[in-house]
Image (cartoon, grey):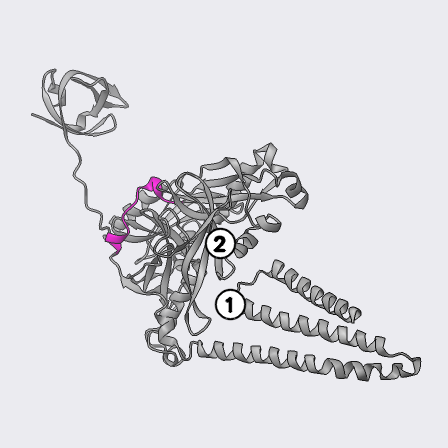
Amino acid sequence: MKKGILASVIKWAVTIVIIALYYWFALPPINLQSRDFWFFIGFIIVVSVAINAFSQLIAAIKEMKSPENVVGVPKIGFKKMAKPIKFAVISVLSLVVLSAVMSIVGSELFNAKSYNQLITLKDGDFVTDVAEINQEQIPVVDKDTATRLGQRKLGEMADLVSQFEIQDIYTQINYKGRPVRVTPLMYGDIIKWFNNQSEGIPAYITVDMTTQETRLVRLSEGIMYSEGEYFMRDLTRALRFKYPTKIFDNVSFEIDDNGTPYWVASVIDFKIGFWSGSDIDGAVLMNAQTGESKYYKIDEIPTWVDQVYNSSMILEQLNYNGKYRSGFFNSIFGQSGVLQPTDGHNYLAIDDDVYLYTGMTSVTSDESNVGFVLTNLRTKATKFYTIPGAEEYSAMDSAEGQVQHLNYTSTFPLLLNVSDRPTYFMSLKDAAGLVKMYAFVDVNQYQIVGTGSTVESAREDYISKLKTENVSDEPEQEPEKIVKVIENINSAVVSGNTVYYLKFADDEAIYTAVVTKSDLLPFAKAGQTVELVLKGNVIEKIEFK
C-alpha cells in the first residue's frame, strides 16, 4: 500500500514538474481565446496520460513474478495503457476539431464585412492635416542608418563596448517635439550578464532623425527588466506572471518626457468569432528600471506613448478594408473597387504622435496609387487621402534615375507637405550605406525630382522645377522692404563695375549695391531716405524717397 502511494506521488510530481517547466519557458496566456493556451491544455493531457501509462507499464512488469511469464508483460501492459491512451487521443482530436470549427466560424468567408470594419477610414484633407514642416525637422535617418550611427556611438565608449551590445529595436518616437529613434543596450552574452546583472543595463541610445545626433544616455539606475534577462527579470516572463490572462502582441521600447525607459506591451483583443480579427484593447506600461507596471485601456494610454499598434497589424487591417469593400466573393471574382496597401510603409511625425504612412493601390495596378492613408499608432485614428499618383517604388526609381551615374540607392519615401503638395522625400545612400544626397519627388508627377547634397538645396531644386512645370502651389512672397537713412556712401570699381558702399543711421553694417540697381546712386548723399530690399548685406533693390 505504501509503495502504491509513493509511486502515485512520484508520478504526479513528475507530471507537475514537466508541466511547470513547459509553462516557465513557453509562457502561454491563461485565456481561452489564445491558441497557445489550447495547445497547453493538449500538452497537459498528453504528458499526464503518457506518464500514467508508463507508470502502469512499470507496475505490470513488477507484478510478473516468474521468468516464464515475461512473455505476457507487453500484453498486460498494453491492456493497462489502452484506456488512458484512448482518452488522450479522443481529447486531443476533440481539441483539434474544436480549433478547426472556431477558425472556420471566424473565417473571412463568413465575416468579410466584419474584417472590412476592423479599421475605419475617414476622408482627410492633406493640406489641413499635414502641415508643412521646416526643413530642419525633416527626418533623414531610417532604421538602417540609425543602426550604423548607434554602433559607432557604442564603439566610442570603451567601458561599455566590451560588455554590452545594442538591441536592434530603434523604436521611432516623438521626444520633446522631435522625431527620434531609441533603443536599449543589451548584455553581450550570459557571462557578461553574470558580471553586470546586479546593476542592470546602464544606458540606452537615441538618434535624432533630423540632425543625426546620436546620444548614449547613461542612467542613474540601470534597466533591470529586458529581453536579455533571466528568471523573473526576463521581460516576457515578468509580464506573463503579472498579467497571466493577457494576450500580448508586440512589446516596444520607449522613453517618457523625462527620459525614463519603458516597455509598452500591447494587449490583443479578438473582434471576430472566437479568436479571429485581432485588434488592440490596451497596453501595459512597464518601467524598465523598477518593473512597476500598469494596464491602460486604449483611450487612457498617456500621450507620450507613440507606438501601441504594431505596423504589421495596421497593414493587415488596411488590407482587409480594401479587400472586402464589396464582400468576400468580389475580392476573388471581378475585384471591383478592391484596394491594397503598397509594399512598404514609413512613419510621419505630426504634433505629438507618430503616424504610419502607406499608399493604397488597386489590385489590378502596380504602377500608381489611388491615395494614401495615415494611421495614428497610439489611437488607430486613420484618414484616407484621395490623391492619385506614383506608388513609392516608382518614385524611388525616379529619384535614383536622377543620380544614376553615382549608383546611389533610395530609402523608402517619407510623405511630406511641400508647398501644399504631397511630396515624397527620401535619402540617397552610397554602397556603404552612408547618406550622400536627398531627393524630393512630386506624388502626382513623379518625373519632377529635386536633388541636392543638403535637404535645403534639394528642396530649392524641387521648388524650382515645380515652378518650371507650372505646378507649384507655393505663393510668390512679396519681398520685405525696409526704410533707412543714408549716413555715409562711397564707391569703388570692382571687376569693371562701380560698386557703392553704404552705411545707414543706427546700423553698424556696411551694405553694397551695384550701379545698375538705380540710376540715382551716383547722386546719393548722406541724409537721404531710401527704401531697400536686402539679401544679407547686398542691396537687391533701392528706391530714393
Q: Residues within 10 Å of mark 2 (few under 14, many from 20)?
A: many
> Mark 1 and mark 2: span between their CA atoms?
18 Å
Residues shaded magenta: 126-139
Question: Percent position (x, y) of residue 104?
Answer: 47, 79
The front one of 77 and 236 is 77
Question: Considering the numbered disc 1 on the image, is that residue within a helix, a strand or a loop?
Answer: loop
Q: Amino acid under label 1?
A: Ser
Q: Is residue 111 left or right of residue 488?
A: right
Residue in the picture at 33% in, 41% down:
135
Q: Nearer the viewer, residue 303 or 437?
A: 303
| Mark linked to residue 34 | 1
Would you place residue 208 above or below residue 389 in this image? above
Which residue does the image show at 30% across and 58% down from the upper left? 444
Percent across and percent down for residue 255 are 44, 43
Question: 11 or 6, which is in the foreground?
Answer: 6
Circle 1/circle 2 CB separation < 8 Å? no
Crowd class of label 1 (few under 14; some 14 to 19; many from 20; radius 10 Å): some
Is residue 138 one of those drawn in magenta? yes
- Label annotation for residue 379: none
- Does residue 315 appear anywhere in the picture? yes
Name which quarter of the figure residue 54 lies in: bottom right
Q: Is 302 covered by the magenta stretch? A: no
Q: Secondary structure at mark 2?
A: strand
- Where's the C terminus, which quadrant? top left
Q: Nearer the viewer, mark 1 or mark 2?
A: 1
Q: Which residue is mark 2?
A: 251
Q: Amino acid at mark 2?
A: Val
In which quadrant of the rendered image does the N terminus lie? bottom right
Q: Is residue 117 above or below residue 513?
A: below
Residue 92 place in picture, x, y as percent: 61, 77
